[in-house]
Image (cartoon, rainbow, N blue to C red):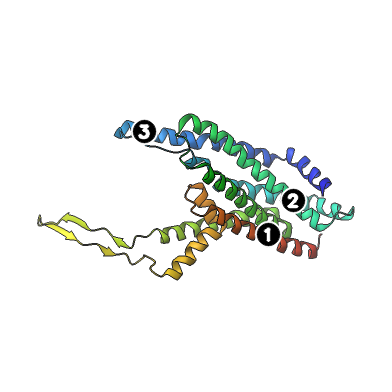
Amino acid sequence: MSKLLYANFFRVKRDKMFWIGFVFMAAMGIFLPLSNFWAIHRIVQETGERVDVPLEGVLFAFNLLVPFAAAIFCSLFVGTEYSDGAIRNKLVIGHRRTDIYLANLITCTAVSLLFAVVFILTCGITGGLTLDGFQMEAKTIALYLLASVCVILVFNALFTCLAMLNQNKAVVAIITILSILLLLFIALYVEGRLSEQEFWDAEFYMNDAGQIVNEPAMRNPNYISSPTVRSFLEFLYDFLPGGQAYQLANAAAQHPGQMSLYSLLIAAVSTLIGMAAFRRKDIK
């Protein structure tokens, strides 16, 4: 497999999409802290109130950015191997299908991790100069970083599975991006349902007759009162990669260690399924 990895990384160094993703992540690592700094400055000027934005508020945003960059890179990188006949040539000279599959998975994951590192470095430097420091404990930061690595792994495992089983790189790119959007939509929906208040607050207002009306607190019909349904949605929020990426990006993950285990499970299952299907795939 070492020869396959060497060949892959040699291609990566000359891959335009890799460098576009590299520059994009570096630019976003600079832009996000500065945009928050400008927003804080505007609020201070308008209200005179001090607004604290901890560094972790923007540092983990790469969890939402890397999947999109990884989806495009992985689909085009693997798809080019099909269109150029590289995979067929690798099989002809004796490389095993399992090694080819794993080499592509490792390559795509390594590139995605590099995207994340670039963002962390640029965001950490820019944010360190313009925003407040960390408010998280060192242990929590370490768990967040571990969960972030696992999220990147699971997305690349899913993308590699799709790319290795479909030779049309344009179709794979569209499917992977739509999959990310769908997962994020599900995460937003679940988060919205879980954050519903059980009661609406009491309200006081003056009617047209000039009388003060007291509206008592009312039960919110959208509140999920069933413990079973709420537990299932909480599990779904932590289990799906979209929910994990959303929580980590917003520094709101309550169970980063548990989410890491979920990611490893999904990555392992999707990789095993992908390798089994690739062994039976007819390479044209």
Residue ID at (49%, 41%): 56
**Image position of 99 (left or right of 264):** right
Q: Circle 3: is it few (<14), some (14-19), or many (20+) Cα within 10 Å?
A: few
Report if residue 171 is visible in the image: no
Provide residue 136's location: percent of width, then percent of height: 48, 42
**Image position of 261 (left or right of 81):** left
Could you tell me the amino acid type at mark 3? Answer: Arg
Residue ID at (51%, 63%): 235
Residue picked out by circle 1 = 268
Between the C-alphas of marks 3 and 1, the distance is: 47 Å
Mark positioned earlier in the residue sequence (1 or 2): 2
Residue picked out by circle 3 = 42
- In the image, residue 213 above or below residue 45: below
Asked if marks 3 and 1 touch (Cβ < 8 Å), the reply is no
Mark positioned earlier in the residue sequence (3 or 2): 3
Residue picked out by circle 2 = 104
